[in-house]
Structure formats: structure tokens, C-alpha cells
Image: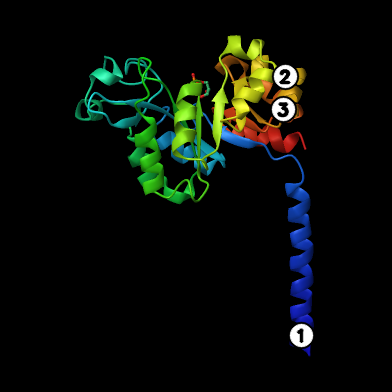
């Protein structure tokens, strides 16, 4: 009898716990996207930066993709390796072997996409940016193949973002399931209208734009068109605009320091 009462009490607790989870998920839970990892604290796009982002409870680690001369997908933002490493040159003029000799900060190496996925596996969510390479679409098929090989699409662990509508459409034609984020250049964001949003909605689920242009009217317009809004920042604006973007209920917020943004989010509740 005692055991029965105990089980009933546990069941009741689970039910009320369940309710509170339902209540919480009905609230506001923007996704935090660690921009190049925890890049305010560690060298961007390195294992240190991604490890720190995951430790600080980012929902996604963001990865900018570029191709090496020998066609490998690596995580680096700039066209050249000059700013982020001790080397010089165009990323796509260097082989992976040459790139691996560079110091990307604190002795870290530039990583291939596969190395990042092998390191973090299903413990991370990946927010991956494609770009055109001199007007050509060279990375989409390789990217989808890698994501499929590691079962990251079927487990809902990957999102693809791009300023290139062409790139996202190519991804969509190869895979219907992966969530896509169409990033807007500032001149596109300044003039965005319902018709353009409806066109974007034919291939993407979310619109990403610079927070400095994401005023209340723009956020409402995107929501009205049944898409989500993710906002990124110029580095110098992040601390001023993060609280404003959370107040405006952006669905996703980029951050160079997930611990900071997580703190602002907690304090805003
Ligand atoms: O990735 C989206 C946002 O961070 C802006 O683009 O690639 O210049 O950092 P990026």
C-alpha cells in the first residue's frame, strides 16, 4: 500500500513537472547562436571557441564555410587567412595541408567541417553558413553529404544559413528537411517587403538580418509573413542591441559570448 502511495506521489510530481515544462515551452525561448563559437573569449572558429560556446549553453555553434584549394570544407570567415592566423594568402589558394600549418590563435588549428562534427557529434547543434565561390555553388552538395553521413539532418541538429538565395535553393532542391535561414544584406533588409518575404518563404524558414535594422515593424512584418527572425550584430552593437532584440522577441539571437546573452535573457524574464 505504502509503495502504491509512493508511486502515485511520483506520478503526480511528474505530471506537475510536465505541466511546468509545457508552460515554459509556451513562453519565449529564443535560440542563442554562438557566432564563430564563443568568439569574444576564444579565437574564432577553433575547438576552444566551440567548446566554450557549448559549455556556456549556446543552442547552436555557428560555422562559416570556405573551401580550400583541394576542395575541403573548412571553418573560416574571411577570404584570406591573414586576420585570424599567423599566415597569409587567400583561403582557396591554400591546400588543407598548408592551412593546417597555421596557428589560428592560442596554438589552435583551422578545422575542417568534418573535424568539428567528429569532435562534437550529436552533443552540439550546427548553424552553418554557405556562400557562393566566385558566383559558383561548390559547397552545397559536399555539405549535405557530410551532414547526412553524420545523421545531423535526421536528428534535427543542423541549420544552414546564407546570404545567397541561390545557395539555399540548391540545398532545398537536394534536401527538403533541413531548416534554412536566408540572411539579408543591409540594403535588402532596409527595403524588405511582403512580396520579397513571400518569395524567400518558398525556400527558407527564417530570415536573418543585422539587429541595427531589425526594428519592431520589421520583426512584426517577418512574423506576419510566418517566418522566424534571427538577428546578428556588428560587434560594437551587441551589448546595446541584445536586450532590445530580446524585448522584440527575435526568435534567434547571434552572440559572441553565449554566457553574456544567456544572462541578459535570464534577467529580462
Ligand atoms: O553569419 C551571419 C552574421 O554573422 C553575419 O555574417 O558571416 O559576416 O559574420 P558574417
User: How many other residues sit within 10 Å of disc 3, few (<14), some (14-19) or many (≥20)?
Assistant: some
Residue at image point 60% right, 35% down:
32
Question: Where's the N terminus, which quadrant?
Answer: bottom right
> Left of 45 or right of it: where is 90?
left
Mark 3 residue's CB less than 8 Å from ligand 1: no
**Horizontal and vertical percent for residue 98?**
20, 25
Q: Secondary structure at mark 2?
A: helix
**109 relative to 8, above or below:** above
**Horizontal and vertical percent for residue 172?**
49, 34
Image quadrant assignment for residue 189: top right
User: How many other residues sit within 10 Å of disc 1, few (<14), some (14-19) or many (≥20)?
Assistant: few
Residue 66 in view in this figure = yes
Foreground mark, 1 or 2, reads 2
Image quadrant assignment for residue 237: top right
Q: Nearer the viewer, residue 92 or 257?
A: 92
Residue at image point 40% right, 20% down:
132
Tell me the residue that label 3 is attached to: 225
Tell me the residue that label 1 is attached to: 4
Residues at marks 3 and 2, CA–CA distance in whole angstroms: 11 Å
Residues at marks 1 and 2, CA–CA distance in whole angstroms: 56 Å
**Horizontal and vertical percent for residue 169?**
49, 28
Query: Counting residues from the N terminus, which is met first, the one under dot 3 or under dot 2?
Result: 2
Residue at image point 42% right, 46% down:
120
Amino acid at each position: 500500500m505504502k509503495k502504491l502511495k509512493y508511486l502515485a506521489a511520483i506520478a503526480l510530481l511528474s505530471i506537475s513537472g510536465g505541466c511546468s515544462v509545457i508552460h515554459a515551452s509556451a513562453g519565449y525561448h529564443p535560440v542563442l547562436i554562438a557566432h564563430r563559437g564563443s568568439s569574444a573569449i576564444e579565437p574564432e572558429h577553433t575547438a576552444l571557441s566551440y567548446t566554450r560556446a557549448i559549455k556556456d549553453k549556446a543552442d547552436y555553434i555557428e560555422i562559416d564555410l570556405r573551401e580550400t584549394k583541394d576542395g575541403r570544407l573548412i571553418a573560416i570567415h574571411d577570404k584570406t587567412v591573414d586576420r585570424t592566423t599567423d599566415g597569409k594568402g587567400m583561403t582557396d589558394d591554400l591546400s588543407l595541408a598548408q592551412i593546417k600549418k597555421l596557428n589560428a590563435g592560442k596554438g589552435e588549428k583551422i578545422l575542417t567541417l568534418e573535424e568539428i562534427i567528429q569532435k562534437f557529434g550529436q552533443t552540439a547543434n550546427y548553424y552553418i553558413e554557405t556562400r557562393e565561390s566566385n558566383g559558383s555553388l561548390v559547397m552545397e552538395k559536399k555539405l549535405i553529404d557530410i551532414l547526412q553521413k553524420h545523421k545531423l539532418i535526421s536528428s534535427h541538429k543542423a541549420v544552414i544559413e546564407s546570404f545567397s538565395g541561390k545557395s539555399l535553393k540548391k540545398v532545398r532542391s537536394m534536401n527538403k528537411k533541413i531548416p534554412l535561414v536566408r540572411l539579408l544584406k543591409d540594403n535588402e533588409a532596409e527595403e524588405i517587403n511582403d512580396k520579397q518575404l513571400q518569395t524567400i518563404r518558398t525556400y527558407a524558414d527564417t530570415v536573418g538580418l543585422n539587429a541595427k535594422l531589425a526594428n519592431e515593424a520589421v520583426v512584426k512584418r517577418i512574423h506576419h509573413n510566418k517566418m522566424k527572425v534571427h538577428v546578428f550584430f556588428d560587434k560594437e552593437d551587441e551589448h546595446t542591441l541584445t536586450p532590445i532584440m530580446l524585448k522584440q522577441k527575435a526568435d534567434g539571437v547571434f552572440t559572441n559570448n553565449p554566457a553574456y546573452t544567456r544572462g541578459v535573457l535570464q534577467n529580462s524574464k
